[in-house]
Image (cartoon, rainbow, N blue to C red):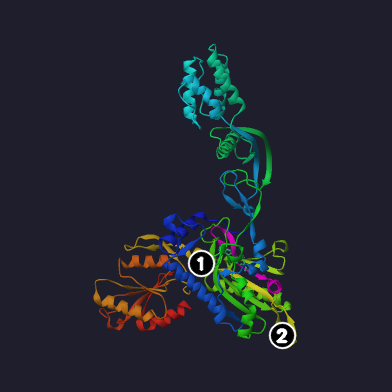
């Protein structure tokens, strides 16, 4: 069972990311671009550390994987052959009230009562009928094209007064206003003043028979928790809003029926309004290449890095002279016009992938699927995501792509729920066969030993950079108690990053900023460590505060230069510093000359 979600924790993480410069909303000063994110000074370091480590273990440490870096702009033929042009879509539904778009498969089932409205009429008289009324009140005036409710009532009450009809001012709801105008027409038509009666008749008949109407049907779901009267009121309010958006300014709605329902997905879970029928929505971003904007110039921003690997398979095979099984790895941007970007960077429209296409013989596919699943789990553990927070979902037969013989999703327990980090799929020979067929170029492999020619099969571990960065931050975030300057315990926010991926590895602090010897020594240490790691020099504020600032960004080590470093108290301690560990907050005395090797070893 997945652990409960923790919205408060997630809020704190998002706020920390902005406050400390990990992740900002894209185009923030212009209101933000939904689904796009900018990584700040620390975020970019974290992201690079992740990508570099992935590249290192996937490409540099292996003989059987080579890298590539393909273009983002993709020829439509590639994505036609891969099936993306035809089928890379999500079923989409729109809220009929707000227009908000949802993925149909993400709508939760709901139960309650459906209120069906079949049409509505406007209680405000249309100008044609209203002109007769205006004529009674003030014969020199012309009826406005679209009179407001206030003006309509003002005129009507003036008529009421002038002709002594004795009607009461209606309540401020469409039904009362409708009744008021109907009564007004009726009473005026029976006036003893013939001209008033004629105009009243004209107004009344027109108002009753030619209202502004909307024949759109509209349904609302109200949950069982509401009592009947409240449910009706709520449904009516939504329906009025719906018809207002269709041009009726003060709609009187017509409730046709009510009907209990269970487990429906037809309604907006946020407001109960009816959703449209699902329609496929292609997630690819289309653009035009060159000066012409027509069919011939269409290109797509790639929706995954994988396709350029398949398309370059033959070239890379030839130049690398690899034998099966072997892989091609790539890290790069991918773009999907997601219907609902959400959960911070988790589902974005622009994101990065780290993908391996590992080519093999058909009989090796299932075994390699298991192998890569285990390799990838080990990778996550090595960057600080414990096995207990990772879950392997075997994608069931009916949810797997038709060409895949086995797919695993590696999931992580995010504060917003258990969600996919990476997919590991055995895709058979589908991709290469499709491109071979569509391009007319052979993508076969010639096996020197067996003298056989065949299209290789492929196992694909496909990970998301941004999702992994988010998982790393979520995993690292913690709060504990630590003493402040005066020894009083306070809450400490600390990112417990695995040192290997921490954006800054070591903070260096002179105890006092106005002591030139301490400062000079601290700067010497910065120069000593910099060739091996990212270092942050900080001389401002009390030392405890400086530690806290580094804890909050996940710096695993802190070096403090004090008077002992200068040999003032004990000559034996000259050129030693305190080395503080972020997690245990323990300090040890270390010789400066030993620092680089010691830290290198601890960073891993
Ligand atoms: N080539 C296979 C492929 O692209 P996928 O499951 O669609 O498979 C692989 O994507 C990984 O890419 C996901 O597990 C996820 O980590 C990342 N990813 C996919 N869509 C994403 C999005 N909209 N935002 C962030 N990451 C995404």
Task: Name the foreground residue: 256 vs 519.
Answer: 256
Q: Which mark is residue 469?
A: 1
Q: Is 373 one of the magenta-colored residues? A: no
Side of 112 relative to 578 (left or right): right
Bin the neighbour count of mark 2 within 10 Å (Cα to Cα): few under 14, some 14-19, many 20 and up.
Answer: few
Extent of the magenta region? 411-439
Q: Which residue is mark 2?
A: 447
Q: Classify mark 1: helix, strand or loop.
A: helix
Q: CA distance from mark 1 to mark 2?
A: 40 Å
Disc number lying in front (1 or 2): 2
Task: Name the foreground residue: 380 vs 512.
Answer: 380
Instruction: Tell me where residue 110 appears, x and y as whole percent.
Output: 64, 46
| Residue 124 visible in this rendered orientation of the protein | no
Instruction: Tell me where residue 360 appears, x and y as whole percent.
Output: 69, 79
Side of 523 relative to 234 (left or right): left
Task: Name the foreground residue: 364 vs 337.
Answer: 337
């Amino acid at each position: 069972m997945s652990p409960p979600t923790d919205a408060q924790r997630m809020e704190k993480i998002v706020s920390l990311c902005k406050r400390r410069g990990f992740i900002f909303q894209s185009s923030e000063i212009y209101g933000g671009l939904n689904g796009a994110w900018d990584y700040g000074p620390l975020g970019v370091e974290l992201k690079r550390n992740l990508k570099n480590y992935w590249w290192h273990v996937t490409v540099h440490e292996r003989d059987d994987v080579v890298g590539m870096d393909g273009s983002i702009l993709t020829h439509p033929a590639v994505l036609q052959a891969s099936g993306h042009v035809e089928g890379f879509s999500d079923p989409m539904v729109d809220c009929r009230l707000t227009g908000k778009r949802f993925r149909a498969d993400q709508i939760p089932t709901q139960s309650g009562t459906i209120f069906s409205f079949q049409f509505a009429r406007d209680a405000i008289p249309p100008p044609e009928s209203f002109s007769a009324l205006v004529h009674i009140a003030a014969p020199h005036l012309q009826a406005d094209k679209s009179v407001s409710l206030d003006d309509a009532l003002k005129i009507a009450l003036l008529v009421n007064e002038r002709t002594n009809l004795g009607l009461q001012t209606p309540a401020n709801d469409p039904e009362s206003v409708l009744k008021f105008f109907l009564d007004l027409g009726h009473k005026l038509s029976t006036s003893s003043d013939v001209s008033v009666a004629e105009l009243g008749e004209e107004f009344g008949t027109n108002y009753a028979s030619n209202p502004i109407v909307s024949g759109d049907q509209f349904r609302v779901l109200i949950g069982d928790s509401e009592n009947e009267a409240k449910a009706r009121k709520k449904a009516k309010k939504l329906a009025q809003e719906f018809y207002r958006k269709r041009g009726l300014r003060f709609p009187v709605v017509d409730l046709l029926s009510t009907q209990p329902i269970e487990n429906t997905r037809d309604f907006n879970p946020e407001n109960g309004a009816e959703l449209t029928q699902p329609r496929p929505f292609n997630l690819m971003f289309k653009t035009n290449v060159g000066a012409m904007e027509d069919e011939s110039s269409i290109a797509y921003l790639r929706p995954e890095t994988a396709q350029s690997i398949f398309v370059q398979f033959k070239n890379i095979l030839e130049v690398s002279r690899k034998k099966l099984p072997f892989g091609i790895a790539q890290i790069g941007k991918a773009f999907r016009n997601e219907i609902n970007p959400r959960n911070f960077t988790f589902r974005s429209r622009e994101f990065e992938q780290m993908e391996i296409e590992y080519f093999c013989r058909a009989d090796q596919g299932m075994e390699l699927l298991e192998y890569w699943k285990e390799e990838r789990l080990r990778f996550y553990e090595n960057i600080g995501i414990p096995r207990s927070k990772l879950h392997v979902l075997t994608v069931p037969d009916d949810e797997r792509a038709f060409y895949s013989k086995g797919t695993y999703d590696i999931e992580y327990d995010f504060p917003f729920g258990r969600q996919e980090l990476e997919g590991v799929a055995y895709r058979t020979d589908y991709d290469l066969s499709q491109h071979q067929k569509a391009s007319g170029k052979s993508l076969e492999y010639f096996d020197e030993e067996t003298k056989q020619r065949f299209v290789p099969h492929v196992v694909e571990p496909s990970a998301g950079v941004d999702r992994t960065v988010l998982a790393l931050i979520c995993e690292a975030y913690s709060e504990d108690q630590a003493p402040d300057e005066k020894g009083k315990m306070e809450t400490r926010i600390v990112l417990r990053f695995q040192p290997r991926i921490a954006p800054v590895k070591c903070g260096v602090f002179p105890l006092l900023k106005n002591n030139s010897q301490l400062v000079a020594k601290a700067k010497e240490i910065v120069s000593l460590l910099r060739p091996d790691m990212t270092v942050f020099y900080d001389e401002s504020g009390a030392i405890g505060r400086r530690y806290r600032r580094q804890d909050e960004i996940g710096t695993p080590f802190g070096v403090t230069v004090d008077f002992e470093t200068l040999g003032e108290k004990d000559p034996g301690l000259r050129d030693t510093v305190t080395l503080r560990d972020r997690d245990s907050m323990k300090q040890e005395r270390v010789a400066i000359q030993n620092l680089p090797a010691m830290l290198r070893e601890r960073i891993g």
